[in-house]
Image (cartoon, rainbow, N blue to C red):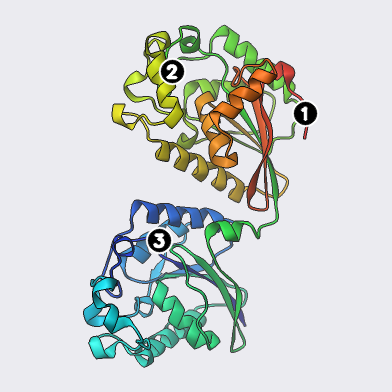
């Protein structure tokens, strides 16, 4: 019988950040830790997991619930997966007990914790339970801890492998009494790089809206497509009529959904709405007459910081962009062509997040072409290949669109 395993460490916790021992004690996931778990869940979304076992500690359970959300599997808690017990050192800062830790062989019974024999016994009992519940060909996910992983490496493979990062991924297998490593440890991005696939993205800005024509700020707020905006959408539809889209995603804003509806007329494709494709949130400046706030807006666009006036921070904008496009690529099949409808300022941020292209560079390139940097229903194309996003073309008007590599 062969059983494949994927071991995922929990995401970053409060004690990871503050440099404290955390064995059997609990420590909550940080916002970064939650994002790490979501990133690994996305990277592993095509893996056909049969069952999931998780440590009963909250940081592991919260990570497992994120990892299993897509496939509907309910993680099963198992006491054998609890982190190695560090006894009196649990909760202590590493710096305060450095003298005790240095030279320590991994047996913590002298400080009221766990011996390696005790760990070995519960690890073996855990795997015995799992194998008894498994059938040939199963893929089992384990969500646990860093020290548990290091001791497992020593017990199953006779040495200690590399450190498993927060939400890191490690593959191994059991077959007829023998344990073998099959991959890792990886970060989510390192694992992505191994997945050989090519995906093409077409990103279309919505058509001109009533707010655009009135020169009003529109981010999360905004008006519907104007007559001109609808004409632009039909021009984009014509420009893209030969592109064989396999998936479609749209911002939840009405103007983006209107644009998508026109682009997909005559196609049997239903778009997915995703809030991560919403325009940048300008807070209290939403709806303002742009000429009245031009100087402030242009200054803020340099840093893309709107948090202090009730909008988004640059970090929040960039995090949702990276999250959406990684997830879209992770869930795609090799050869897919994906259509997205969204917004202009979001496009400028995408250039920076995915390709390191600044707003100034994008504006300068458009100036050389005597073009508008982000026209109504402008079309922008790029690719995803072997874990990396590859820039192809800046946004162009539908009338100027060419499928150049």
Instruction: Give me the disc on residue 299.
Output: none
Label 3 vs 2, first from the N-terminus: 3
Whether residue 263 appears in this view of the structure is no
Crowd tier of the residue under label 2, counting other residues whose Cα lies within 10 Å: few below 14, some 14–19, many 20 or above: some
Crowd tier of the residue under label 1, counting other residues whose Cα lies within 10 Å: few below 14, some 14–19, many 20 or above: few
Residue 119 in the image, given as x and y percentages of width and height: 37, 86
Residue 74 in the image, given as x and y percentages of width and height: 42, 63
Crowd tier of the residue under label 3, counting other residues whose Cα lies within 10 Å: few below 14, some 14–19, many 20 or above: many
Instruction: Give me the disc on residue 11.
Output: 3
| Residue 52 versus residue 285 in the image, above or below | below
The residue labelled by disc 1 is: 242
Looking at the rendered image, the quarter that the C terminus falls into is top right
* Gap in angstroms between the C-alphas marked 1 and 2: 31 Å
Residue 387 in the image, given as x and y percentages of width and height: 63, 52
Looking at the rendered image, the quarter that the N terminus falls into is bottom right
Residue appearing at x 57%, y 17% in the figure: 207
The residue labelled by disc 2 is: 222
């Amino acid at each position: 019988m062969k059983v494949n395993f994927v071991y995922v460490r929990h995401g970053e916790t409060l004690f990871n950040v503050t440099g404290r021992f955390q064995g059997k004690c609990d420590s909550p996931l940080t916002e970064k830790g939650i994002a790490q778990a979501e990133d690994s869940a996305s990277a592993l979304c095509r893996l056909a997991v049969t069952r999931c076992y998780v440590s009963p500690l909250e940081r592991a359970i919260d990570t497992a619930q994120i990892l299993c959300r897509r496939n509907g599997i309910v993680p099963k808690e198992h006491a054998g997966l609890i982190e190695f017990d560090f006894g009196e050192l649990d909760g202590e800062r590493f710096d305060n007990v450095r003298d005790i830790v240095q030279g320590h062989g991994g047996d913590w019974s002298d400080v009221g914790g766990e011996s390696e024999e005790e760990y070995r016994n519960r690890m073996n009992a855990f795997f015995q339970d799992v194998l008894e519940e498994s059938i040939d060909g199963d893929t089992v996910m384990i969500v646990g801890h860093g020290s548990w992983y290091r001791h497992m490496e020593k017990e199953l493979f006779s040495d200690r492998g590399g450190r498993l990062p927060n939400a890191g991924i490690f593959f191994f297998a059991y077959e007829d009494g023998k344990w073998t490593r099959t991959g890792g440890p990886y970060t989510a991005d390192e694992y992505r790089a191994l997945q050989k696939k090519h995906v093409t993205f077409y990103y279309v800005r919505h058509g001109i809206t009533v707010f655009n024509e009135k020169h009003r700020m529109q981010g999360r707020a905004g008006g519907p497509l104007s007559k001109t905006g609808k004409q632009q959408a039909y021009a984009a539809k014509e420009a893209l009529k030969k592109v064989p889209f396999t998936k479609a995603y749209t911002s939840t804003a009405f103007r983006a959904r209107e644009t998508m509806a026109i682009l997909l007329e005559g196609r049997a494709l239903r778009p997915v709405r995703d809030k991560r494709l919403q325009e940048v949130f300008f807070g209290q400046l939403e709806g303002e007459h742009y000429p009245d706030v031009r100087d402030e807006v242009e200054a803020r666009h340099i840093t893309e910081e709107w948090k202090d006036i009730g909008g988004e921070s640059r970090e929040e904008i960039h995090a949702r962009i990276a999250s959406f496009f990684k997830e879209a690529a992770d869930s795609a099949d090799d050869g897919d062509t994906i259509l997205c409808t969204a917004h202009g300022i979001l496009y400028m941020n995408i250039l920076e997040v995915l390709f390191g292209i600044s707003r100034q560079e994008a504006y300068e390139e458009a100036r050389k072409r005597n073009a508008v940097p982000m026209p109504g229903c402008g079309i922008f194309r790029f690719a995803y290949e072997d874990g990396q996003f590859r820039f192809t073309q800046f946004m162009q008007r539908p009338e100027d669109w060419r499928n150049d590599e």
